[in-house]
Image: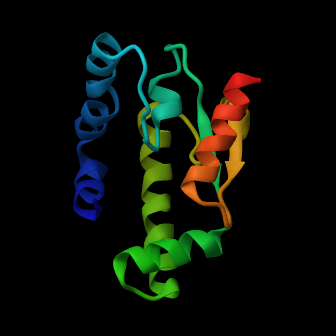
Amino acid sequence: VEVLVEMAKDDHEIDRHIDFGFVETITSQHPFFVLDARLGWWVLRDVPAYHVYFSCSDMERFDRLAKREGITATEAGDKALVRESLDQARFRALYRIEFPPPEHQFSLCLNTAGKRPDFLAEEIVHELES
């Protein structure tokens, strides 16, 4: 991911291809789908959708990244902050949007701290059914 992020700094077509290349394919072939993407809320803004924003504290994010990548939480925090800084600059230059996005852009916002994925899925289903 880091290599691609670095390449995308100088070649905006990489981002545009990734961000919009899949939208038409997915929406034309699948009437219902789940998309996990940093800009999914924005690239699908004209598609009727239920957008869910997952958040947690920076410390929790860094701990999760550290466990996933086998590094310290400090290293993970440094790595995450560098990526976020690069993403913020790119998304602002490319699309004139702020990142992370404002929560009002979403149908539902969930704090994932201490919650298992199955519990979060149940919360989403409950919200959809109510």
- Please tell me which residue is depicted at 34% across the width and 22% down the height of the picture: 23
* Residue 83 visible to an observer of this rendering: yes
Judged from this view, the residue extending furthest toward the right is 130
* Closer-to-camera residue (2/13): 2
Residue 115 image-quadrant placement: bottom right
Residue 128 image-quadrant placement: top right
Q: Is residue 126 above or below residue 49?
A: below
- Image quarter in which the C terminus is found: top right
- Please tell me which residue is depicted at 50% across the width and 51% down the height of the picture: 88
Q: Is residue 66 above or below residue 40?
A: below
* Residue 101 visible to an observer of this rendering: no
Q: Is residue 114 above or below residue 51?
A: below
* Closer-to-camera residue (100/54): 54
- Give coordinates of residue 56: x percent, y percent: 66, 61
- Please tell me which residue is depicted at 30% across the width and 32% down the height of the picture: 16
- Give coordinates of residue 58: x percent, y percent: 63, 69
* Closer-to-camera residue (122/68): 122
Q: Is residue 87 above or below residue 35?
A: below
- Please tell me which residue is depicted at 22% across the width and 62% down the height of the picture: 3
* Closer-to-camera residue (26/128): 128
Q: Is residue 115 left or right of residue 75?
A: right
